[in-house]
Amino acid sequence: MFYDLPFIKHWTMTYSERVVRNNIILNLSKDGFGQGIISGLVNLSQQMVSEVLKKAAFGLPMSTKCKGVACRLSDEDLKKLPAFLAKGPGCYGFEGAYWTHARVGYVIKKEFGVDYENKQVGRILRLIKWTRQKPQNKDAKQSLEKVEKWKVETLPALKKAIEEDYERFFEDECTNQLCGNIVATYSPIGKTPELPLQDTKGYQYVCVASAISELGRMFYQVRDESFKGDGIIEFLKGLLAFSSRKVLLIWGNATWHKSQNVKDFLNTALGQRLWIANTPPYSPEFNPDELVWANLKRVQIPNRFAKNVKELKTIVHNGMLKIQGSVELVKSFFNLHSHKCCKLNFG
């Protein structure tokens, strides 16, 4: 005797199907069959059989599902669900631009009249190819109009540089302060360590500028001072010496990037090999070189502490050398989905 039930996937069963299944389990139990045998006969886990018998013994309701409520979404419903979720949580009265299983379950019930437990909502999300992801922070000052204008006007113009065999680099700068860079430490279980916040004002620092290309090449400089004024010109000269080809350099909107010094340098014989373009204002997501600093501080030199600027400069330099020496690592900065520039069509 074997009950090959067509509804063994309990999360897709209707109310009436659950009633039939539970009655079969109860009748088999009354006939003296053990839970292990019943589990094999109805093709259901022994844990599920045990839950049904316990609920019957204590007079508890057999199902949390309401009679008459549909238990699964149709293929057509699954096609419509992404469009509803694309409206955003705010459209359904939720605060905060993020989705949870409970929130998505609310949308499903509101739009389709289907009631799912939270743990089953994850299965639905996988069916529509939605996954749990770390959100990307966006600067509140970013102008979507300027971003779209940049895509429409600047990007097409840069195609000429690709056609003329320019090597494309993305550039950015950061500072590393003398105060400690503590990423993680050890402590007893249940006792999270608390470190006092340090006032970074007045601390000495070193500045780093880097430029990376899709070929996995990276050029960088470490300085005791900022790259304002002559510093940025020295960096550009070094970059041109680093590459034997003409260079397309895409960087941010720092004031020294648009200074008269830079404009004058572009008019020199050496500067004629350089084509400079800016990313949209307040849009670091368009610059994969931003990932260099995350890797430097959290992977290459975490938990570092330097006694003086000279020692800090050596630590930073060694960290940058490790990144520069890994072609695949540099290429990976262009492959991460969080940086939109990697998906923009220059060619």
Image (spheres, helix red, strand yellow):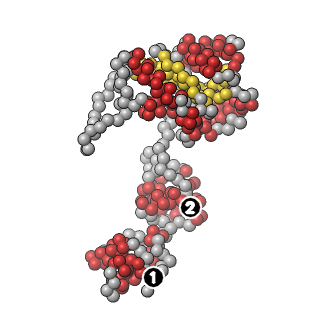
| Disc number for residue 231 | none
Q: Quadrant of the C terminus?
A: top right
Residue 332, position in %: x, y?
55, 38
Please give left or right for residue 39 compared with residue 133 in the image: left
Residue 45, position in %: x, y?
39, 72
**Residue type at the position of mark 1:** Tyr
The answer to which image quadrant residue 271 occupies is top right
Residue at 32% of width from left, 77% of height from top?
53
Label 2, secondary structure: give it.
helix
Residue 210, position in %: x, y?
54, 24
Q: Is residue 289 visible?
A: yes
Q: Quadrant of the N terminus?
A: bottom left
Q: Nearer the viewer, residue 62 or 6?
A: 6
Q: Nearer the viewer, residue 66 or 153?
A: 153
Front: mark 1 or 2: 1
Please give left or right for residue 61 compared with residue 344 in the image: left
- Of the residues under marks 1 and 2, which one precedes in the sequence? 1
Residue at 48% of width from left, 53% of height from top?
92
Please give left or right for residue 189 compared with residue 85 in the image: left
Q: In the orientation shown, which residue stands out farthest toward the front?
A: 325
For disc 2, the marked residue is 78
For disc 1, the marked residue is 3
Residue 157, position in %: x, y?
71, 30
Label 1, secondary structure: give it.
loop
